Amino acid sequence: MKVKCFVCGAEETDRVYLHCVHEGQEKLVCTRCLPMLIHGAH
């Protein structure tokens, strides 16, 4: 299974990832996209 950010699609060799639950499903988000999820897109 390839690890990918569910927001930007970056693959496992590019970034650091965190587990999260989104819409009732466990997903992975990269640390680059995490601030957008916390603060919303500007």
Image (cartoon, rainbow, N blue to C red):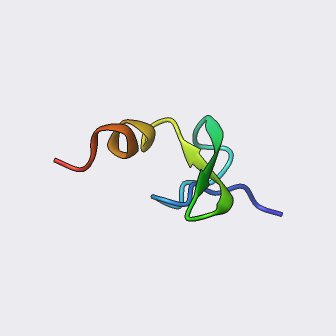
> Which picture quadrant has residue 2?
bottom right
Q: In the picture provided, is 5 more to the left or to the right than 1?
A: left
Q: In the picture provided, is 2 more to the left or to the right than 25?
A: right
Tally the numbered discs.
0
Identify which residue is drawn at 42% across, 44% down.
33
Identify which residue is drawn at 46% across, 58% down.
8
Tell which residue pokes out farthest to the right in this image. 1
- Front residue of 2/22: it is 22
Q: What percent of the width, then of the height, locates residue 32? A: 43, 38
Identify which residue is drawn at 23% across, 50% down.
41
Tell which residue pokes out farthest to the front in this image. 24
Q: What percent of the width, then of the height, locates residue 40? A: 27, 47
Q: What percent of the width, then of the height, locates residue 37? A: 39, 45
- Front residue of 22/29: it is 22
Identify which residue is drawn at 63% across, 63% down.
24
Q: Is residue 16 above or below residue 9?
A: above
Q: Is residue 8 above or below residue 17?
A: below
Q: What percent of the width, then of the height, locates residue 17? A: 63, 39
Which quarter of the rendering shows the N terminus? bottom right
- Front residue of 4/29: it is 29
Tell which residue pokes out farthest to the left in this image. 42
> Which picture quadrant has residue 4?
bottom right
- Front residue of 9/20: it is 20
